[in-house]
Amino acid sequence: MASFRSLFKLFCFQALLSTATTSRTVQSYDYIIIGGGTAGLTIASRLSEDPQNSVLVLEAGTDHSSDINVLAPGLYTGMYGNPEYDWDYKTVRQIHANNQVTAHPRGKQLGGSSAINFLYWTHASQQDINSWGELGNANWSWEAIDPFFKRSEQFVSPSGVVEQDLQTGNIVTTLYGDNGPIVNTFPDIYGPIDEAWPRTFQALGLEVKSDPRDGLALGGYTNLLNLDLDGRKRSYAATAYYLPASKRPNLKVITGALAERIILEKGNDIVTANGVQYSNKTTAHAKKEVILSAGSIGSPQVLELSGIGDPNILKKQGIEVLVNNRNVGENLQDHVYVPIGFKVNTGITTLDNFTDPAFFDAAYEEYAANATGPLASTGASSGLSSYPQIGCGNLRPSANFSNALAPGLKEQYELQAKYFSSEAVTQELTVSGGMSPLKSNDSSQLFLASSPGNFLSLLGVLEHPFSRGSTHIASSSPSVYPILDPNYLSHPFDLNLLTTIAYHLQSLASVSPLSTYLQGNGTIYQPGYYPLNETNIESFIKANLQSE
């Protein structure tokens, strides 16, 4: 998923938005949080633990915390492109990727994207976290953050049968939290492909040799899911952080509240955030802090609407410049992936079965009644690999980066190059069903196979892209979506990396035991996909890449 990693230091911006008491309205709170997503609800829950703190959360979406479409693990695909659940952003045409428009699903509801994602609970490596500190962010390190990882989770150990079937015996329970709000475990309903996945990596000598949570674990394994086996339902920010706190008198959450701007007061030497204007110019005032947590696309939009950003962009939309900061909306990075689809053997159930109304109705009724059946689980097959492991040990990014790069970007590139050979820089995973080639601009069609049949999709994700993009307002109206340009493949090294990833996915399908569940031992493709070679692979990637 995209991340807004601003090149100006976050602690400076936090100081910038220090707040002052105001009495201009009776609607006043100690803390106002813009965005009731994954981070916003976590912050709201923690702040409101102190009864002396009054907390307001403004969320543009609605509350779906009791909605079966969110809770049932197998129903997530139906939320993509649905405006009830998904912002469904679109990029501008990507000039380095066939001039295509690409959809960007983002959760538009309490819980944000934790409500619509694949349920995966995958941690960064120790070096990834420590790199934040190397970039100058004091106290950001694996050692400092790990206690908070543990505090957030409640790990539920698998049964002996699950441990054997899904090869989870390398789990070290002391690495996990046992009393946090987010429930993590392994699925207890799964199919033969899920069992074959870790064994296939073992056949390649790429099995995980330690717990994936130990700081660096390369290889194929069964991923933890945000899955509460009590009802087999999604565990996410709304159910884990908001609902237990929802009765607190000092916490108020307003849904359908679109933030229009942060109310700023300009003094001699400082700009102070006094509150927030939201839907229909309603105002709420903050006595202590305004906390902006609207995501990688929403947060820059709110800043610019408030007068914080590049003067050239703000003046074009008639917005008064209160803080000149040309870094707002810049340095946008997005995890992109390429999918490849294969036809599975007769009798293997996949998401494609849900296109049969009778099958879907029966599965829906079974889940609603008993929390069992095909909707009660989702795939958890994953793999983290370094590039030498997937066959590009001789491929190296340039170690000489221009001093003309934007401040901070040169340092980022140098760190990426430094750890290129040793870190997990691609994630490979499965989707149990067909994905539509050439549907990157319509996420509502993404999980519909291009033809009848049952398929397996293998996805290869670029975890550390070199390309950088931007997101900026297109209007002074908060309801107008911003101009989203991730600038895919603008750095030529990304295409080289995705080429190697796609080749590895293709070869993976022909390795036993995975290949034994695919027609032609992994040589029969879903219609729309085809064997990749040096003459067609670059055009394939440019036509089919998608946003994670």
Image (cartoon, grey):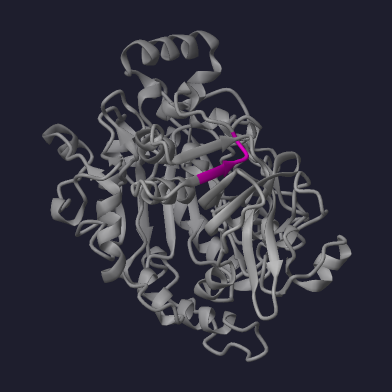
Q: Work out whether residue 456 or residue 420 is closer to the camera in this orientation and state it.
A: 420
Q: Main secondary structure of the magenta part?
A: strand
Is residue 357 placed above or below 475 in the rendered structure?
above
Q: Work out whether residue 453 or residue 314 is closer to the camera in this orientation and state it.
A: 314
The reply, left or right, for residue 364 in relation to residue 485 is left
Is residue 315 placed above or below 54 in the rendered structure?
below
Q: Position of residue 205 (x, y in %)?
A: 26, 59
Residue at image point 21% right, 44% down: 179
Does the magenta segment cover residue 482?
no
The reply, left or right, for residue 473 in relation to residue 374 is right
Q: Name the quadrant containing residue 60.
A: top right
Q: Position of residue 131 (x, y in %)?
A: 40, 76
Q: Is residue 454 visible?
A: no
Span highlighted in magenta in the image: 56-61
Q: Is residue 532 visible?
A: yes
Q: Position of residue 271 (x, y in %)?
A: 66, 71
Residue at image point 53% right, 69% down: 14
Q: Name the quadrant containing residue 438.
A: top right
Residue at image point 53% right, 79% down: 413
Residue at image point 83% right, 72% down: 312
The reply, left or right, for residue 315 in relation to residue 513 is right
Does the magenta segment cover residue 58?
yes
Q: Work out whether residue 105 or residue 362 is closer to the camera in this orientation and state it.
A: 105
